[in-house]
Amino acid sequence: MRHLQRMRSVFKCVLFVSITLCAIYLISPSVKLLIGFIPMEKCHLESAKNLDSSVDASLNLQSRPDVQTCTYWKAAIIWEGLFDARLYDEMHKMKGSSVALTVFAVGRYLDAYLHTFLNSAEQHFMVGLPVTYYVFTDMPEKVPNIKLSPLRSMKVIKVEKNSRWQDISMMRMKSISDVIESDIRHHCTHVFCFDVDQVFTGRFGSEALGDSVALLHAHYYHLPKYLYTYDRNPNSKAYMKTGDFYYHAAIFGGSWKNVKALTEACYQGIMEDKRNNVEALWHDESHLNKYMLLHKPSKVLSPEYCWDTSIGFRRDIQVTRLLWAPKYYDTLRTP
Protein backbone atom coordinates (compact mmCIF):
# COMPACT_ATOMS: atom_id res chain seq x y z
CA MET A 1 0.00 0.00 0.00
CA ARG A 2 2.80 2.42 0.89
CA HIS A 3 4.55 1.59 -2.38
CA LEU A 4 1.34 2.34 -4.30
CA GLN A 5 0.86 5.65 -2.51
CA ARG A 6 4.48 6.58 -3.19
CA MET A 7 4.04 5.80 -6.89
CA ARG A 8 0.91 7.95 -7.05
CA SER A 9 2.76 10.82 -5.38
CA VAL A 10 5.63 10.55 -7.84
CA PHE A 11 3.20 10.46 -10.77
CA LYS A 12 1.40 13.60 -9.55
CA CYS A 13 4.71 15.39 -8.99
CA VAL A 14 6.03 14.56 -12.48
CA LEU A 15 2.74 15.61 -14.07
CA PHE A 16 2.66 18.88 -12.10
CA VAL A 17 6.25 19.78 -13.00
CA SER A 18 5.74 19.01 -16.70
CA ILE A 19 2.53 21.01 -16.95
CA THR A 20 4.01 23.92 -14.97
CA LEU A 21 7.08 24.15 -17.20
CA CYS A 22 4.95 23.97 -20.34
CA ALA A 23 2.62 26.65 -18.95
CA ILE A 24 5.61 28.94 -18.38
CA TYR A 25 6.70 28.31 -21.96
CA LEU A 26 3.27 29.00 -23.42
CA ILE A 27 2.81 32.22 -21.44
CA SER A 28 6.24 33.84 -21.78
CA PRO A 29 7.20 35.31 -25.19
CA SER A 30 10.86 35.55 -24.17
CA VAL A 31 10.94 31.87 -23.24
CA LYS A 32 9.35 30.98 -26.59
CA LEU A 33 12.05 32.95 -28.37
CA LEU A 34 14.86 31.23 -26.46
CA ILE A 35 13.35 27.78 -27.05
CA GLY A 36 13.79 28.37 -30.78
CA PHE A 37 17.57 28.31 -30.33
CA ILE A 38 17.57 24.76 -28.93
CA PRO A 39 18.96 22.68 -31.83
CA MET A 40 17.01 19.80 -33.30
CA GLU A 41 18.57 16.41 -33.94
CA LYS A 42 20.05 15.98 -37.41
CA CYS A 43 19.15 13.55 -40.17
CA HIS A 44 21.62 10.68 -40.27
CA LEU A 45 20.95 9.80 -43.92
CA GLU A 46 23.18 11.17 -46.68
CA SER A 47 20.61 10.64 -49.42
CA ALA A 48 16.82 10.46 -49.68
CA LYS A 49 17.31 7.25 -51.68
CA ASN A 50 17.86 5.58 -48.31
CA LEU A 51 14.45 6.63 -47.00
CA ASP A 52 11.91 3.95 -46.22
CA SER A 53 9.54 5.41 -48.85
CA SER A 54 10.78 5.37 -52.45
CA VAL A 55 8.24 8.10 -53.27
CA ASP A 56 10.38 10.57 -51.33
CA ALA A 57 13.65 9.68 -53.13
CA SER A 58 13.75 13.11 -54.80
CA LEU A 59 13.96 14.99 -51.47
CA ASN A 60 17.12 16.99 -50.78
CA LEU A 61 17.64 16.08 -47.12
CA GLN A 62 20.84 18.10 -46.81
CA SER A 63 19.31 21.35 -48.06
CA ARG A 64 18.10 22.27 -44.57
CA PRO A 65 21.00 21.70 -42.13
CA ASP A 66 19.19 23.88 -39.57
CA VAL A 67 16.44 21.30 -38.93
CA GLN A 68 15.86 17.56 -38.64
CA THR A 69 14.84 16.23 -42.06
CA CYS A 70 14.44 12.51 -41.33
CA THR A 71 13.71 10.18 -38.44
CA TYR A 72 15.78 7.30 -37.16
CA TRP A 73 13.30 4.89 -38.75
CA LYS A 74 13.98 6.54 -42.15
CA ALA A 75 10.84 8.60 -42.59
CA ALA A 76 11.10 12.05 -44.16
CA ILE A 77 10.28 15.21 -42.21
CA ILE A 78 8.92 17.67 -44.77
CA TRP A 79 10.23 21.25 -44.70
CA GLU A 80 10.34 24.07 -47.22
CA GLY A 81 13.38 23.65 -49.47
CA LEU A 82 13.45 19.85 -49.43
CA PHE A 83 11.04 19.04 -52.24
CA ASP A 84 10.22 19.86 -55.84
CA ALA A 85 6.48 20.57 -55.80
CA ARG A 86 6.11 19.98 -59.55
CA LEU A 87 7.63 16.49 -59.34
CA TYR A 88 5.35 15.47 -56.48
CA ASP A 89 2.24 16.79 -58.23
CA GLU A 90 3.09 15.03 -61.51
CA MET A 91 3.84 11.77 -59.73
CA HIS A 92 0.57 11.76 -57.76
CA LYS A 93 -1.46 12.67 -60.84
CA MET A 94 0.12 9.73 -62.67
CA LYS A 95 -0.65 7.44 -59.73
CA GLY A 96 -4.26 8.62 -59.62
CA SER A 97 -4.08 9.88 -56.05
CA SER A 98 -7.27 11.36 -54.61
CA VAL A 99 -7.82 12.85 -51.18
CA ALA A 100 -10.63 12.90 -48.63
CA LEU A 101 -10.49 15.83 -46.21
CA THR A 102 -12.47 15.33 -43.01
CA VAL A 103 -13.38 18.22 -40.73
CA PHE A 104 -15.75 18.55 -37.77
CA ALA A 105 -17.80 21.73 -37.35
CA VAL A 106 -20.08 21.14 -34.38
CA GLY A 107 -22.03 23.72 -32.41
CA ARG A 108 -20.64 27.26 -32.50
CA TYR A 109 -17.51 26.07 -34.31
CA LEU A 110 -19.47 25.94 -37.58
CA ASP A 111 -20.32 29.66 -37.65
CA ALA A 112 -16.94 30.69 -36.27
CA TYR A 113 -14.61 28.79 -38.58
CA LEU A 114 -16.04 26.55 -41.30
CA HIS A 115 -16.51 29.11 -44.10
CA THR A 116 -12.96 30.44 -43.79
CA PHE A 117 -11.51 26.94 -43.46
CA LEU A 118 -13.20 25.65 -46.63
CA ASN A 119 -12.48 28.77 -48.70
CA SER A 120 -8.80 28.68 -47.78
CA ALA A 121 -8.65 24.93 -48.48
CA GLU A 122 -9.96 25.58 -51.97
CA GLN A 123 -7.03 27.90 -52.59
CA HIS A 124 -4.21 25.84 -51.07
CA PHE A 125 -5.07 22.22 -50.24
CA MET A 126 -3.98 19.55 -52.76
CA VAL A 127 -4.58 21.88 -55.71
CA GLY A 128 -4.81 19.89 -58.94
CA LEU A 129 -5.82 16.61 -57.28
CA PRO A 130 -9.36 15.24 -56.78
CA VAL A 131 -10.51 16.26 -53.29
CA THR A 132 -13.71 15.40 -51.44
CA TYR A 133 -14.59 17.37 -48.31
CA TYR A 134 -16.37 15.38 -45.62
CA VAL A 135 -17.97 17.89 -43.25
CA PHE A 136 -19.25 16.42 -40.00
CA THR A 137 -21.76 18.68 -38.26
CA ASP A 138 -24.86 18.70 -36.08
CA MET A 139 -26.37 21.44 -38.30
CA PRO A 140 -26.15 20.36 -41.97
CA GLU A 141 -28.49 23.15 -43.04
CA LYS A 142 -25.94 25.76 -41.93
CA VAL A 143 -22.98 24.43 -43.92
CA PRO A 144 -21.91 27.31 -46.21
CA ASN A 145 -22.32 27.01 -49.96
CA ILE A 146 -18.75 27.13 -51.21
CA LYS A 147 -17.91 27.40 -54.91
CA LEU A 148 -15.75 24.36 -55.56
CA SER A 149 -13.10 23.95 -58.22
CA PRO A 150 -13.26 21.15 -60.81
CA LEU A 151 -12.44 17.67 -59.42
CA ARG A 152 -13.63 18.76 -55.97
CA SER A 153 -16.83 17.90 -54.13
CA MET A 154 -18.38 18.03 -50.68
CA LYS A 155 -20.37 15.60 -48.55
CA VAL A 156 -22.07 16.59 -45.31
CA ILE A 157 -22.49 14.01 -42.54
CA LYS A 158 -24.82 14.70 -39.64
CA VAL A 159 -23.45 13.86 -36.20
CA GLU A 160 -24.82 14.31 -32.72
CA LYS A 161 -23.51 17.12 -30.56
CA ASN A 162 -21.96 15.88 -27.33
CA SER A 163 -22.38 17.99 -24.20
CA ARG A 164 -18.61 18.09 -23.57
CA TRP A 165 -16.11 19.39 -26.14
CA GLN A 166 -13.71 16.67 -24.98
CA ASP A 167 -16.20 14.02 -26.11
CA ILE A 168 -16.70 15.75 -29.46
CA SER A 169 -12.94 15.63 -29.96
CA MET A 170 -12.58 12.01 -28.93
CA MET A 171 -15.68 10.60 -30.64
CA ARG A 172 -14.59 11.95 -34.02
CA MET A 173 -12.31 8.90 -34.24
CA LYS A 174 -15.30 6.57 -34.55
CA SER A 175 -17.08 8.86 -37.03
CA ILE A 176 -14.02 9.02 -39.28
CA SER A 177 -13.54 5.24 -39.14
CA ASP A 178 -17.20 4.66 -40.00
CA VAL A 179 -17.23 6.98 -43.02
CA ILE A 180 -13.97 5.50 -44.32
CA GLU A 181 -15.60 2.08 -44.27
CA SER A 182 -18.91 3.18 -45.79
CA ASP A 183 -17.73 5.73 -48.34
CA ILE A 184 -14.16 7.03 -48.51
CA ARG A 185 -12.42 3.74 -49.27
CA HIS A 186 -14.50 3.40 -52.45
CA HIS A 187 -13.50 6.83 -53.80
CA CYS A 188 -10.22 8.10 -52.34
CA THR A 189 -6.67 6.80 -51.96
CA HIS A 190 -5.73 9.09 -49.07
CA VAL A 191 -7.38 10.77 -46.08
CA PHE A 192 -6.41 13.92 -44.19
CA CYS A 193 -8.19 14.82 -40.96
CA PHE A 194 -8.26 18.45 -39.78
CA ASP A 195 -9.51 20.57 -36.91
CA VAL A 196 -11.77 23.31 -38.23
CA ASP A 197 -10.21 26.23 -36.32
CA GLN A 198 -7.37 26.65 -38.82
CA VAL A 199 -6.72 28.63 -41.99
CA PHE A 200 -4.70 27.53 -45.04
CA THR A 201 -2.22 30.23 -46.04
CA GLY A 202 0.16 28.45 -48.42
CA ARG A 203 0.68 25.34 -50.45
CA PHE A 204 -0.44 22.19 -48.60
CA GLY A 205 0.22 19.84 -51.46
CA SER A 206 0.96 16.31 -52.58
CA GLU A 207 4.36 16.32 -50.86
CA ALA A 208 2.36 15.77 -47.65
CA LEU A 209 0.78 12.53 -48.87
CA GLY A 210 2.05 9.24 -47.50
CA ASP A 211 0.98 5.90 -46.07
CA SER A 212 0.88 7.31 -42.53
CA VAL A 213 1.38 11.01 -41.84
CA ALA A 214 1.90 12.77 -38.51
CA LEU A 215 2.52 16.43 -37.65
CA LEU A 216 5.15 17.91 -35.34
CA HIS A 217 3.42 20.10 -32.77
CA ALA A 218 4.50 23.73 -33.22
CA HIS A 219 4.91 24.27 -29.47
CA TYR A 220 7.04 21.19 -28.82
CA TYR A 221 9.41 20.53 -31.72
CA HIS A 222 12.31 22.38 -30.09
CA LEU A 223 11.60 21.26 -26.53
CA PRO A 224 13.45 18.43 -24.76
CA LYS A 225 11.44 15.22 -24.58
CA TYR A 226 10.97 15.33 -20.82
CA LEU A 227 8.70 18.35 -21.35
CA TYR A 228 6.43 16.56 -23.82
CA THR A 229 2.97 16.26 -22.28
CA TYR A 230 2.36 12.61 -22.97
CA ASP A 231 -0.23 10.90 -20.80
CA ARG A 232 1.74 9.70 -17.75
CA ASN A 233 -1.17 7.87 -16.12
CA PRO A 234 -0.39 4.13 -16.22
CA ASN A 235 -4.11 3.40 -15.95
CA SER A 236 -4.78 4.97 -19.35
CA LYS A 237 -4.40 3.18 -22.67
CA ALA A 238 -2.64 6.35 -23.86
CA TYR A 239 0.09 6.00 -21.21
CA MET A 240 3.61 6.73 -22.42
CA LYS A 241 6.91 6.96 -20.56
CA THR A 242 8.58 8.62 -23.52
CA GLY A 243 8.28 8.85 -27.28
CA ASP A 244 9.90 9.99 -30.51
CA PHE A 245 8.19 13.36 -31.05
CA TYR A 246 5.10 15.13 -29.78
CA TYR A 247 2.49 14.97 -32.54
CA HIS A 248 -0.40 17.38 -32.98
CA ALA A 249 -3.83 15.81 -33.52
CA ALA A 250 -5.05 18.91 -35.39
CA ILE A 251 -3.79 17.14 -38.54
CA PHE A 252 -3.15 13.51 -39.33
CA GLY A 253 -3.49 11.46 -42.47
CA GLY A 254 -2.35 8.66 -44.72
CA SER A 255 -3.80 5.97 -46.92
CA TRP A 256 -7.42 5.21 -46.13
CA LYS A 257 -6.39 1.82 -44.71
CA ASN A 258 -3.88 3.33 -42.31
CA VAL A 259 -6.15 6.17 -41.19
CA LYS A 260 -8.92 3.65 -40.57
CA ALA A 261 -6.55 1.53 -38.46
CA LEU A 262 -5.42 4.59 -36.49
CA THR A 263 -8.92 5.90 -35.78
CA GLU A 264 -10.19 2.47 -34.79
CA ALA A 265 -7.28 1.92 -32.39
CA CYS A 266 -7.68 5.38 -30.82
CA TYR A 267 -11.42 4.87 -30.42
CA GLN A 268 -10.91 1.50 -28.77
CA GLY A 269 -8.39 3.03 -26.36
CA ILE A 270 -10.75 5.91 -25.55
CA MET A 271 -13.65 3.53 -24.85
CA GLU A 272 -11.54 1.27 -22.66
CA ASP A 273 -10.45 4.32 -20.68
CA LYS A 274 -14.09 5.33 -20.29
CA ARG A 275 -14.98 1.88 -18.94
CA ASN A 276 -12.19 2.32 -16.39
CA ASN A 277 -13.27 5.90 -15.50
CA VAL A 278 -10.07 7.28 -17.01
CA GLU A 279 -9.62 10.20 -19.44
CA ALA A 280 -6.32 10.77 -21.19
CA LEU A 281 -4.58 14.07 -20.49
CA TRP A 282 -5.02 15.49 -24.00
CA HIS A 283 -7.89 13.23 -25.03
CA ASP A 284 -7.66 11.91 -28.62
CA GLU A 285 -4.24 13.58 -29.07
CA SER A 286 -2.80 11.47 -26.25
CA HIS A 287 -4.13 8.32 -27.89
CA LEU A 288 -2.80 9.41 -31.28
CA ASN A 289 0.68 9.91 -29.83
CA LYS A 290 0.56 6.43 -28.30
CA TYR A 291 -0.51 4.93 -31.63
CA MET A 292 2.26 6.72 -33.51
CA LEU A 293 4.81 5.43 -31.02
CA LEU A 294 3.75 1.84 -31.71
CA HIS A 295 3.11 2.34 -35.44
CA LYS A 296 5.71 4.77 -36.77
CA PRO A 297 4.47 7.26 -39.37
CA SER A 298 5.97 6.92 -42.83
CA LYS A 299 6.11 10.70 -43.19
CA VAL A 300 6.24 13.57 -40.70
CA LEU A 301 5.16 17.12 -41.46
CA SER A 302 7.10 20.04 -40.02
CA PRO A 303 5.31 22.78 -38.03
CA GLU A 304 5.07 24.78 -41.28
CA TYR A 305 1.96 22.69 -41.87
CA CYS A 306 0.21 23.95 -38.72
CA TRP A 307 1.83 27.05 -37.23
CA ASP A 308 0.79 29.20 -34.28
CA THR A 309 1.77 32.83 -34.81
CA SER A 310 1.71 33.47 -31.05
CA ILE A 311 5.04 31.62 -30.88
CA GLY A 312 6.65 34.54 -32.64
CA PHE A 313 9.57 34.52 -35.05
CA ARG A 314 11.39 31.27 -35.74
CA ARG A 315 14.20 31.26 -38.27
CA ASP A 316 13.47 27.66 -39.29
CA ILE A 317 9.87 28.44 -40.27
CA GLN A 318 10.47 29.80 -43.77
CA VAL A 319 6.84 29.48 -44.88
CA THR A 320 3.51 28.88 -43.17
CA ARG A 321 1.03 26.62 -44.91
CA LEU A 322 -1.70 26.45 -42.28
CA LEU A 323 -2.23 28.77 -39.32
CA TRP A 324 -4.06 28.34 -36.05
CA ALA A 325 -7.15 30.54 -36.11
CA PRO A 326 -7.89 32.67 -33.03
CA LYS A 327 -9.27 30.52 -30.22
CA TYR A 328 -12.44 31.60 -28.44
CA TYR A 329 -12.69 28.76 -25.97
CA ASP A 330 -14.71 30.72 -23.39
CA THR A 331 -17.58 31.22 -25.81
CA LEU A 332 -17.25 28.28 -28.22
CA ARG A 333 -16.90 25.54 -25.61
CA THR A 334 -19.75 26.60 -23.37
CA PRO A 335 -22.93 24.46 -23.58
Image (cartoon, rainbow, N blue to C red):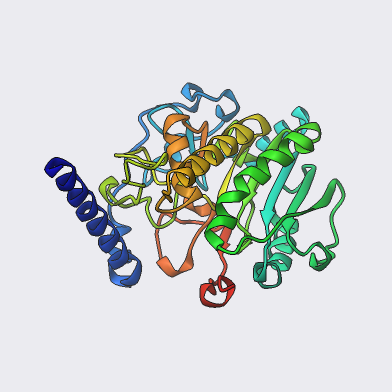
Residue drawn 29% across the image and 71% down it: 30
In depth, the one of 175 and 300 nearer the eye is 175
Residue drawn 43% across the image and 44% down it: 276
158 relative to 68 in the view: left or right: right
Q: Position of residue 80 (x, y in %)?
A: 52, 48
Q: Position of residue 218 (x, y in %)?
A: 44, 56
- Determine the residue located farthest toward the left in the rendered image: 2
Instruction: Tell me if residue 273 can be seen.
Output: yes
- The quarter of the image holding the C terminus is bottom right
Q: Position of residue 274 (x, y in %)?
A: 48, 47
State whether residue 46 is above or below residue 175.
above
33 relative to 295 in the view: left or right: left
State whether residue 151 is above or below residue 56.
below
In depth, the one of 268 and 36 nearer the eye is 268
Q: Position of residue 188 (x, y in %)?
A: 76, 36
In depth, the one of 311 and 91 nearer the eye is 311
- Determine the residue located farthest toward the bottom in the rendered image: 331
State whether residue 237 is above or below residue 46.
below
- The quarter of the image holding the N terminus is top left
Q: Would you identify the image quadrant in which residue 235 lies?
A: top left
- Determine the residue located farthest toward the front in the rendered image: 1
229 relative to 128 in the view: left or right: left
State whether residue 166 is above or below residue 24.
above
Instruction: Tell me if residue 78 can be seen.
Output: no
Q: Would you identify the image quadrant in which residue 144 lies?
A: bottom right
